[in-house]
Amino acid sequence: MRKLLFAISFVMLITVSLLIACSGKDRTDSPDTAQSQLKALDKTLDNINMYRDQRRIAIDSLRAESRNITDSLRLWQTLLELSSQYRLLNADSATLIARYAMEYAPSTLSKDEITYGKLKAIQAISTSGLFYAALTRLDSISPEGMPLDLKIEYWNTTRMAYSYAASHAQGLDEYVTTLQKTQQAMSDSLLKYLPHTDTMYRFLYCSELVKSSDWQRAEVMLSKFLKEVPLSDNFHGMLAYQLAQAYKNQGDFENYVKYLAIAAQSDILANVKEGLALQELARWLYRQGDYERANRYISQSLEDAITGNVRMRTAAISNIASLIETTNQKELRRSHNSMAIYAVTSTVLFILTAALAFIFLRNSRKIRANEKKLSSSTKKLEAYVANFIALCSNYSRRLDNLTMLVGRKIAAGQTEDLVKMINSGKINEQDSEGFYSLVDKALLDLYPDFVESINTLLAPDKQIELKAGELLTPELRIYVFIRLGINQSTKIAQILHYSVNTVYSYRNRMRNRAIDRDNFDEQVANLGSHENWIDNLPE
């Protein structure tokens, strides 16, 4: 996918160069300070793949670390961090990993920790453009009773979701106004809880100054804060973008372009694919007649939106790209190479169509894969129900038979014979054999590869080999329940009709055969929990 998108960008840049070469129109240069910053932005764009690779190396390192984590809490925390790292680079991947984190979250998590994980997942969903899902999940969470740090995370997540939704609804004034009002209310709530020294507080506070037309004050504060935040920090780009808006509203277009270029450069260094600066700069340069840069910037913005799966930006960027393309066609019609121009334009449109078709097919494959997973889950559920009914039926039949036997013995006056049968244990032995047979079958329906999996945790010379016709040994039967999350020996003893000492004895016997005796029970509990999908985390 990445190679295809890079190929599309390359072809688009070639197309733009041909269009500009044919236009023969003089370009209007920006003022010196703005021009120098645009040149710095161009150099940064030349090295964009290097910055992307640096981020991927960091992410790959975190992914590699996650594969070696056996502690469920630490794995959960690492996956949430991995989702946050992915969010600005690829929103769909961030959403997928956040879902993994919540599906395999340890049962020991507190209510606040679970809420924190949900908020991280909602942030990823919002960035990917799935606003209905994000806002629906937010409606199910109440900030009442939350600790301060979690409240800050909640209001920031809510502000982000409504901000992205408003950006996506551009052109639908009624909806945009409603969403922006809600976003403003969320920002106000967030400002109440953030420390005044926090960078987010500074950003939101200055944004309010810009919205309220207090531009000179915003200019002073933003200029000061920019010096304190590194260029490679995402907040640097956000602050620079607000400063550009303050200069624009004051009619200082030189500094407007300069700080837009700084914001775009910061977005690239921070590997942000949802930024507004580059596309807004492209629109401005297009109006000034700098078509070469405008095309390069809008092409990069479109590539970032597609590869990052930032759906809310794709539509807006496509509109700008369409506008620039229309102007280029008008310029080309004035030249003597109209046939070549039409061919190049058709090629670009064909490639874009192919890219969209590829994305559509990929999403279709995902849908089919999800349908298969749902079908598999349904079959498993049916198997669980069938095994449960079989166990109930077995007990019902055994109870009926026992009732009939007792009735016959009492009616015949054979009470002493009945007592001897009960004391001999023959009745319980027959019941137990049928019960264990059904239990073993049900457990192996759940974990068909359980014996092979547990053998990987045992010493080579102490592997378990089942006898012909044997489903599970008593030791294996106990450890299947541990895999199911039932770790207390007393509960296992009650379920299997063993004595507690028998369960202790079997567990100790298995630990003595293990490679890692101290962590054997935890390793069994985690069998198959994440190793099958951790290697398939998205690149």
Image: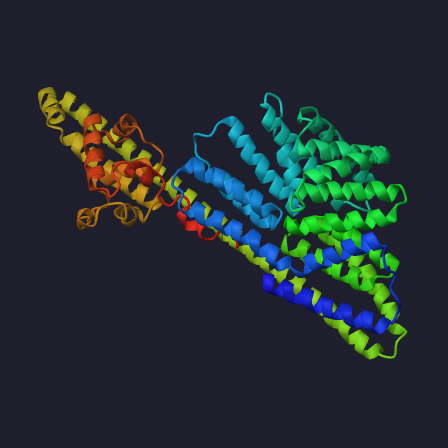
Where residue 167 sits in the image (x, y, percent)? 75, 44
Colouring: rainbow
Q: Residue at 59% across / 35% down in the picture?
A: 119
Note whether 106 is above or below 195 in the view shown: below
Give 84 or 372, whichever is nearer the viewer: 84
Note whether 244 is above or below 481 in the view shown: below
Q: Which of the 4 image quarters holds residue 494?
A: top left
Residue 193 shows in the view: yes
Give 332 or 209, whichever is nearer the viewer: 209
Left or right, 451 with respect to 193, comes to left
Left or right, 302 with respect to 290, comes to left
Left or right, 34 with respect to 385, comes to right
Residue 179 shows in the view: no
Question: How many numbered callouts?
Answer: 0
Q: Which of the 4 image quarters holds residue 196?
A: top right
Where residue 117 sits in the image (x, y, percent)? 54, 35
Note whether 129 is above or below 499 in the view shown: below
Q: Residue at 21% across / 30% down in the picture?
A: 504
Location of the N terminus (image quadrant): bottom right
Where residue 492 sits in the image (x, y, percent)? 28, 30
Left or right, 25 with respect to 131, comes to right
Where residue 442 sits in the image (x, y, percent)? 32, 41
Q: Residue at 62% across / 47% down in the picture?
A: 88
Give 128 or 227, whichever is nearer the viewer: 227
